[in-house]
Image: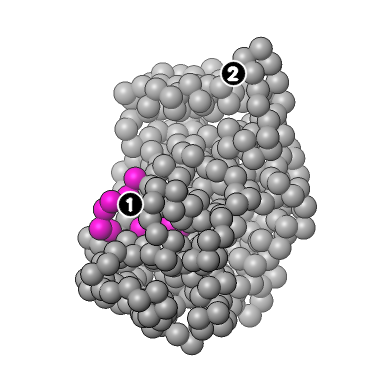
C-alpha cells in the first residue's frame, strides 16, 4: 500500500506540481474555506476539473509553507485501494510519516462516493482527527442521501465548466481593448466548444462521446440496474434537443415507449449526474410542480456534439443560465408569453442574442414586477450585469 500512496503523493519526495492551468475564481472560492472546520465537498460533472482544482489547492498549500508530508491525496475509485476503508488509509499515511493525532493534516479524498459508508467515516474524521478535509463526487444523489450524517459539518461547492474568460485563458488567447471587436467571434467558438477543460485543450470530439457514455453506462445504468442503456442514450438526446426549452416528460415517454414514471426517474438520474439542469416555472407551489421544467445542458460542447451547432440564441441562453445558476432562477409563463428568468433576488432577465423582443413579450416584460430588469444580448452584456451584482 505504501508504494501506491507515494504514487498519489509525489510531493512527499519533493516533486513539483506542474502542468496545470489555473482557474483563479474557482480556486479562490475553494481556498476561502481553508480555515473553516467544515468538510468541503466539490461536486459537478465528470471531468469538469475537480481533481485539477484539488491539485491547484495542494500546490497553493505547499507554496504557503505547509509541509508536503502533511498533505494526503487519494482517489477512491482506484481498485488497488478499494479493499481499504478511508480510516485505514489515513492510519497508514500517519504511520508512514509518523504524524500524531495532535498534528494537523490536509486530506483530499477524490471520488469519495466510491466508499460505501463514506459519510460515517467522514464524521469520525471530523470529530476525532485534527484534519481539514476536501472531498469530491460526481453524484448529487449519493451526496444528498448521505449528507444528513454530516449536518452542520459540510459545505458543498459545485464546479461548473469553464466560462468564456476561463476558456480564453486555457486557449492562451488575450484580447486587448483595441481588439475588442474579436470578442463575439471567439465567443461563438466557445459556444461551439464548451468548457470541459481537457476538451478545450485537446479538441478531440471522441472525448465528449466517451464522457457521456461513461456517465450513462457507469454512473446511471450500472448503479441503477438499467438493462437497456440505449433507451437512456435516446432519452438524453431528446433532452439535448429540448435544451433551453420546456421538456414534456409525458411526450418524451411516448416517443420512447416508456412509462411517464420511468421518464421521471431517468430525468432525475441525468440531473443527479450533472449532465442537465432543470429550471422550474415561477409561481405558486402547484404551478411550479405541475408545469413542465425548462432544461439546460451542463456544458455547451456536449450539447453541440449531440445536436449540432445551431440555434445560437438557445446556446446563448444556456450560457446565461450557467452564469446565473447560483441566483436560483425560475422562468415566467403567462398568457402564452414567456420571460427567460426571474432570479431569487428578483431580477428579471430576458435573453435575446443579437435580437429584439416581440411586442407581446415586451408587454409581459414590462408588466412583471421585479427589483431590476435586464435584457442580455451579448457576452459583454452578461459580464457587465454580473460585474454589478
Q: Which of marks 1 and 2 is nearer the N terminus?
A: 1
Q: Is residue 149 above or below residue 191?
A: below
The quarter of the picture where residue 367 lies is top left
Numbered mark located on residue 98 in the image: none
> In the rendered view, how is the structure colored?
one colour
Can you see residue 245?
no
Can you see residue 354?
yes
For image coordinates 36% across by 70% down, the residue present is: 145
Please give the range of residues in magenta.
32-45
Report the number of discs: 2
Of the two numbered discs 1 and 2 in the rendering, the one whose residue sits closer to the viewer: 1
Q: In this view, does 352 lie above or below 82?
A: above
Task: Give the main secondary structure of the magenta stretch.
Answer: loop
Bin the neighbour count of mark 2 within 10 Å (Cα to Cα): few under 14, some 14-19, many 20 and up. Answer: few
Q: Where is residue 369 in the image (x, y as percent from the top left)?
A: 33, 24
Residue 152 relative to residue 17: left or right:
left
Examine the structure image and report whether residue 10 is included in the region drawn in magenta. Answer: no
Query: To which residue does mark 1 refer?
Result: 34
Label 1 to label 2: alpha-carbon separation = 46 Å
The quarter of the picture where residue 143 lies is bottom left
For image coordinates 72% across by 26% down, the residue present is: 185
Query: To which residue does mark 2 refer?
Result: 356
Q: Position of residue 36 (x, y in %)?
A: 26, 53
Q: Where is residue 278 in the image (x, y as percent from the top left)?
A: 48, 50
Residue 94 relative to residue 248: left or right:
left
Q: What element carries label 2?
A: loop
Q: Circles 1 and 2: CB distance less than 8 Å?
A: no
Q: Is residue 148 above or below residue 337?
A: below
Amino acid at each position: 500500500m505504501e508504494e501506491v500512496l507515494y504514487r498519489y503523493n509525489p510531493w512527499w519526495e519533493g516533486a513539483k506540481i506542474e502542468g496545470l492551468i489555473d482557474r483563479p475564481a474557482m480556486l479562490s472560492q475553494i481556498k476561502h474555506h481553508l480555515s473553516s472546520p467544515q468538510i468541503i465537498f466539490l461536486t459537478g460533472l465528470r471531468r469538469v476539473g475537480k481533481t485539477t482544482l484539488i491539485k491547484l489547492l495542494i500546490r497553493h498549500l505547499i507554496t504557503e509553507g505547509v509541509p508536503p508530508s502533511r498533505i494526503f491525496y487519494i482517489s477512491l475509485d482506484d481498485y488497488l485501494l478499494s479493499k481499504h476503508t478511508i480510516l485505514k488509509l489515513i492510519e497508514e499515511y500517519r504511520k508512514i510519516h509518523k504524524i500524531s493525532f495532535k498534528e494537523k493534516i490536509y486530506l483530499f479524498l477524490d471520488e469519495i462516493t466510491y466508499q460505501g459508508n463514506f459519510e460515517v467515516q467522514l464524521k469520525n474524521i471530523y470529530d476525532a482527527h485534527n484534519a481539514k478535509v476536501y472531498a469530491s463526487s460526481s453524484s448529487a444523489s449519493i451526496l444528498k442521501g448521505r449528507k444528513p450524517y454530516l449536518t452542520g459539518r459540510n459545505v458543498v461547492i459545485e464546479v461548473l465548466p469553464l466560462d468564456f474568460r476561463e476558456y480564453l485563458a486555457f486557449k492562451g488567447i488575450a484580447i486587448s481593448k483595441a481588439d475588442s471587436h474579436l470578442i463575439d467571434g471567439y465567443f461563438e467558438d466557445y459556444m461551439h466548444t464548451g468548457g470541459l477543460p481537457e476538451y478545450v485543450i485537446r479538441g478531440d470530439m471522441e472525448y465528449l462521446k466517451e464522457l457521456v457514455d461513461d456517465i450513462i453506462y457507469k454512473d446511471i445504468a450500472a448503479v441503477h440496474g438499467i438493462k437497456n442503456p440505449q433507451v437512456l442514450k435516446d432519452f438524453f438526446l431528446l433532452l439535448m434537443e429540448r435544451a433551453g426549452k420546456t421538456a414534456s416528460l409525458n411526450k418524451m415517454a411516448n416517443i420512447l415507449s416508456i412509462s411517464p414514471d420511468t421518464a421521471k426517474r431517468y430525468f432525475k438520474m441525468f440531473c443527479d449526474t450533472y449532465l442537465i439542469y432543470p429550471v422550474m416555472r415561477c409561481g405558486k407551489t402547484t404551478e411550479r410542480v405541475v408545469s413542465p421544467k425548462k432544461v439546460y445542458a451542463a456544458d455547451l460542447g456536449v450539447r453541440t456534439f449531440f445536436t449540432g451547432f445551431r440555434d445560437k440564441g438557445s446556446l446563448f441562453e444556456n450560457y446565461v443560465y450557467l452564469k446565473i445558476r447560483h441566483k436560483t432562477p425560475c422562468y415566467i409563463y403567462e398568457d402564452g408569453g414567456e420571460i427567460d428568468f426571474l432570479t431569487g433576488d428578483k431580477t428579471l432577465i430576458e435573453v435575446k442574442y443579437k435580437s429584439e423582443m416581440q411586442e407581446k413579450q415586451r408587454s409581459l416584460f414590462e408588466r412583471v414586477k421585479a427589483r431590476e430588469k435586464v435584457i442580455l444580448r451579448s457576452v459583454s452584456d452578461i459580464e457587465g450585469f454580473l460585474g454589478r451584482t
